[in-house]
Image (cartoon, rainbow, N blue to C red):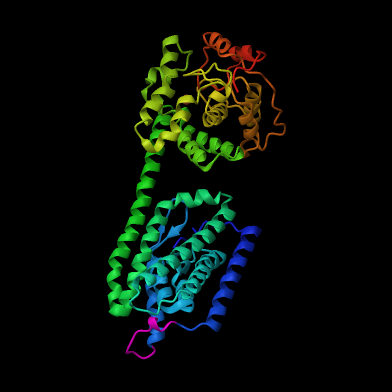
Amino acid sequence: MPRLSEEWHMSRRLGALIAIVALASGTLLVSVILRCQIGAAVAIEDVPNGLWLGVLFWVALTILGSSLAVRMPGGNYVDVGFAPVVAAMSLGGPIVAGLTALIGATQTRELRRQVPWYGVLANHAGITGPAVLSACALSLVPRSNPSNVWVDFLATFGAACLFFSLNTLTTTMFVSVRNGESMWRLVRADSGAYLNMLALAPVAWLMARMYVAAGWWAVLLFAVPLYTTRLAYQRFVEVREMFTETVRSLAEAVDKRDTFTSGHSHRVQTIAMDIGRVMKVSDEELEALEWGGLLHDIGKIGVPDSVLLKQERLTREERVTMNAHPVLGAEIIAPVRKLAPELPIIRHHHEWFNGSGYPDRLVADEIPLLARILHVADAFEAMTAARPYRMTPLTSAQALAELRKFGGIQFDPDVVDAFVKTEWVRDVPDAGRPEIRDVPTIGQAAGSMAKSATHPDLGPAAPDSAAFAPVRPPATA
Ligand SMILES: [Fe+2]
């Protein structure tokens, strides 16, 4: 079952949402307790108080499953407690489903007081309500004929899907309101585990059948597949984390070659993602900015120290070597299929809006949007950090003034406008206004490019760039 992480930041909206879900779940549980009966199939036969012992058995099994929770990349926790709740739902109806979910969802994190009370309330309400509702839906299906196994199976599977969907929807709503993230992005982040979770539905049905046919002890045999499923979640998370950490280490290894650029890629990644959010790029594009931000300068791995660390002006040959890093970076990343969306960002993050950048001298909209975003983030970070050629970094206001000055020349003015709305320049009293400039033709840009001899990572380079400012007409659209 998906649960929420312990990182809670209570807001009025979140409080209202938790209150609504808790009230609805509580009302549902109380009304089924008052109006329904416990399904006899949940009783352990031939023992005194077999009915309540049966309920206790499923609650204990769910607690055990819940205690083996795994933290997913989206930040939520999932566990295998889903299967016993569905089995209890199938055997005992809405009351048993509700009680099993309510009590069985207790996690060790809660007992250790690592989750605030409203977090505990949200977790339990987000599981109990969906469990009761799904059990009510299941009770509408006539399953009394023991020979009709398929009806029983399909009905239980359907109820499990409903339970899982409602539980996921509720949990995702909480996280979305809490973090301001898109619900779709959160669902996608944990999608691999959700598919695994649905595979537990047939296991849950089998557990219920075995409980009736062979007795409570037979259910314990399912501990092995359930534990294997839990291991699969863990493996999924570990592999993804390993990938993330490897990419981070790779980016940091490149930055660390120069003591002045340590942490550069990580900061560029954060700035680029903030601009992306303001520009409302899609979740896929935001993820591309996340990886692309980290890896944009990976091609510098192939630039010799004598060029990369040189503090004097680069010779023509050295500049050619340095300017090859976007192409080299794209070539390095190309074999990694998972990083295909990042390739245009890496290749084109030094293209200029007026066509005088490199490697392909693209103009305006020809440059992929994400590369234009990254270019602004890269320049702002470079200008506001110390460099050997400029030990005193520019202030945010000075750097923003440069971005404004070269909007339409080096930078996409729309991206600069979006950047102005991020936290990075919130303290700048006058964010300036976008200047309307026309884009030169590629031929004009190429002519001036020959004269250009600025360092690629210095940020805006005024003398040559200024030549493009007044040129007409626009060459692209
Ligand atoms: Fe670069």
Q: Which residues are magenta?
A: 39-49
User: Which quadrant holds residue 307?
Assistant: top left
Quadrant of the drawing holding the C terminus: top right
User: Does the magenta portion include 418?
Assistant: no
Q: Is residue 48 above or below residue 339?
A: below
Residue 66 visible in the current orientation: no
- Observer-nearest residue: 85 or 72? 85
Left or right position of 412 against 228:
right
Q: Check the image and name the residue furthest to the bottom.
A: 48
- Observer-nearest residue: 398 or 30? 30
- Residue at point 52% right, 40% down? 286
User: Which quadrant holds residue 429?
Assistant: top right
- Observer-nearest residue: 372 or 388? 372
- Residue at point 62% right, 39% down? 423
Q: Give percent across and percent down for residue 328.
A: 39, 23
Secondary structure predominantly adopted by residues drawn in magenta: loop
Left or right position of 124 against 45:
right
Q: How many marks?
A: 0
Residue 31 visible in the current orientation: yes
Quadrant of the drawing holding the N terminus: bottom left
Q: Give percent across and percent down for residue 254.
A: 40, 30
- Residue at point 40% right, 42% down? 244
Q: Give percent across and percent down for residue 172.
A: 53, 56
Q: Is residue 250 above or below residue 157?
A: above
Q: Give percent across and percent down for residue 169.
A: 52, 59
